[in-house]
Image (cartoon, grey):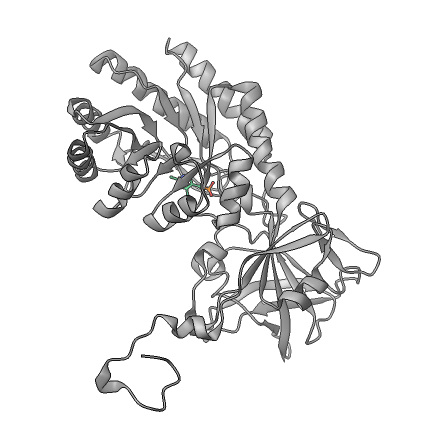
């Protein structure tokens, strides 16, 4: 089985991540537990920076915070010289709390509130990626009230739909995001933005999907976007100075996923952009990429403790763990597939086939179907791989399960970066109207 990042199997047969024994981590911090491999996060951030520095120096790497964002993660991204893409006031607040340089922040979202836009202006974020005309007009109004210019990109829907291994080109794309190219809305939006006084249109943005392993879809996107850039130059005399291709590079969750490296991705898009720009006699724009999953995904592992085991003879063995869709909703949401091993018996041959169930009151709360493992016993520690992206950030308190802690491991050290929620946290925001109050209540009114 493929191990990720700094993982290795120790002489004691235990899984080690960042030099830390996963069984000890589970003992010390409890389970479920998210473990983030700092060296792997940094390696991937550096890989993006380096491949673009070599192939397209005028570029920026902006980490997509929605993937996995905490104050410590913001600190790591800043240390690695990446910018940050945020999609809400809450993400922006987290970045500000971490002292992240706001000029390197891009604000996204298809329905930013006025309060979020105000917050972005107040803190002078680097770019606002405008999604629709309502937002464009609101932003002009807010910026003019402040008498301060704001630099924007317009989000374009290029009509390229990426699937994991390929793409389709659609005409009128059906998406809640951005301005469509085919229907002329994108051009109209550019024209409108150019009339505005306080909004300064710097460039264009697109994002064609996520978990993309077929690089051909990025080639097509670059062709479509540069054709549009050439058209805008010819017809409106407007030059696109910055082009963001969004995120989307996939990772290898299981052996079914092809391995596509950050180096291959970076070289491919840089070369394609250069050759298309040359073909169309365009000046090279600043290139922006917004990777999320491909930075955090493989760096994360979730540790669980095995509890009840139920065998239905001739059908299936259910092995239940102490987490599930509350800490990892991706299986229920997208039929995502994961690999896992028993962290305390990582050397033993996988002689059993079991299905890993969560503890939520939903039949759909399954983590893995048909996993090969040594015959599991209650008390074993199950390590599920590649949970660094869209797990912690999508976690909920469904069934009033407290959300797990997150530890950052590196060189044999483990640091807590998010505390485990407590039962008190679960009732902390509850209030009780006086007519329902009772002396028996254990919470303060
Ligand atoms: C989600 C998102 C990303 C990151 O996508 P990944 O597939 O995780 O790399 C980047 N940009 C935008 C606008 C997004 O919505």
Q: Residue at x 56, y 36 (%)?
A: 45
> Is there any visible trace of residue 335 in the rendered image?
no
Residue 215 placement (x, y as % from top left)? 51, 31
Residue 116 in the image: above or below residue 440: above
From the viewer's side, name the closer residue of 349 and 57. 57
Residue 321 in the image: above or below residue 261: below
Question: Which corner quadrant holds the C terminus?
Answer: bottom left
Relative side of 89 to 312, left or right: left
Q: Residue at x 65, y 42 (%)?
A: 39
> Is there any visible trace of residue 37 in the rendered image?
yes
Q: Which corner quadrant of the image does residue 394 belong to?
A: bottom left
Residue 41 placement (x, y as % from top left)? 59, 42
Q: How many marks?
A: 0
Q: Ligand 1: give its quadrant.
A: top left
Residue 72 placement (x, y as % from top left)? 53, 48
Residue 206 in the image: above or below residue 272: below
In this view, the residue farthest toward the right is 11
Relative side of 154 to 253, left or right: left
Relative side of 106 to 199, left or right: right
From the viewer's side, name the closer residue of 87 and 226. 87
Q: Residue at x 58, y 20 (%)?
A: 54
From the viewer's side, name the closer residue of 162 and 73. 73
């Amino acid at each position: 089985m493929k191990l990720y990042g700094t993982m290795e199997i120790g002489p004691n047969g235990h899984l080690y991540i960042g030099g830390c024994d996963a069984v000890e981590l589970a003992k010390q911090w409890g389970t479920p537990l998210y473990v983030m491999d700092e060296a792997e996060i940094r390696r991937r951030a550096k890989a993006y920076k380096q491949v673009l520095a070599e192939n397209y120096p005028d570029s920026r790497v902006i980490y997509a915070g929605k993937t996995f964002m905490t104050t410590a993660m913001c600190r790591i991204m800043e240390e690695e010289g990446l910018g940050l893409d945020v999609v809400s006031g809450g993400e922006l607040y987290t970045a500000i709390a971490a002292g992240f340089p706001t000029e390197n922040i891009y604000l996204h979202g298809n329905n930013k509130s006025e309060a979020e836009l105000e917050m972005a202006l107040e803190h002078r974020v680097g770019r606002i990626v405008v999604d629709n005309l309502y937002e464009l007009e609101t932003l002009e109004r807010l910026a003019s009230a402040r008498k301060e210019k704001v630099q924007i990109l317009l989000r374009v829907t290029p009509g390229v739909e990426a699937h994991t291994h390929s793409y389709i080109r659609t005409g009128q794309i059906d998406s809640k995001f951005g301005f469509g190219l085919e229907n002329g809305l994108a051009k109209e939006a550019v024209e409108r933005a150019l009339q505005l006084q306080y909004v300064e249109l710097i460039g264009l943005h697109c994002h064609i999907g996520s978990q993309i392993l077929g690089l051909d879809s990025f080639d097509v996107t670059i062709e479509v976007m540069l054709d549009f850039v050439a058209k805008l130059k010819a017809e409106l005399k407007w030059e696109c100075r910055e082009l963001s291709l969004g995120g989307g590079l996939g990772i290898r969750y299981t052996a079914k996923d092809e391995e596509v490296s950050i180096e291959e991705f970076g070289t491919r898009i840089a070369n394609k952009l250069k050759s298309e720009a040359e073909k169309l006699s365009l000046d090279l724009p600043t290139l922006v990429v917004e990777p999320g999953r491909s930075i955090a995904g493989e760096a994360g592992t979730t540790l669980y403790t095995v509890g009840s085991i139920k065998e239905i003879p001739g059908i299936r063995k259910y092995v239940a763990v102490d987490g599930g869709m509350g800490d990892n909703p991706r299986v229920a949401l997208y039929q995502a597939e994961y690999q896992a091993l028993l962290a305390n018996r990582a050397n033993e041959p996988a002689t059993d086939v079991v299905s890993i169930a969560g503890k939520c009151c939903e039949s759909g709360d399954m983590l893995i179907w048909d996993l090969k493992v040594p015959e599991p016993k209650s008390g074993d520690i199950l390590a599920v791989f590649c949970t660094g992206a869209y797990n912690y950030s999508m976690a909920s308190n469904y069934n009033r399960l407290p959300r797990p802690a997150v530890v950052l491991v590196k060189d044999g050290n483990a640091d807590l970066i998010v505390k485990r929620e407590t039962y008190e946290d679960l009732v902390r925001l509850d209030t009780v109207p006086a007519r329902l109050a009772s002396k028996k209540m254990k919470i303060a009114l």
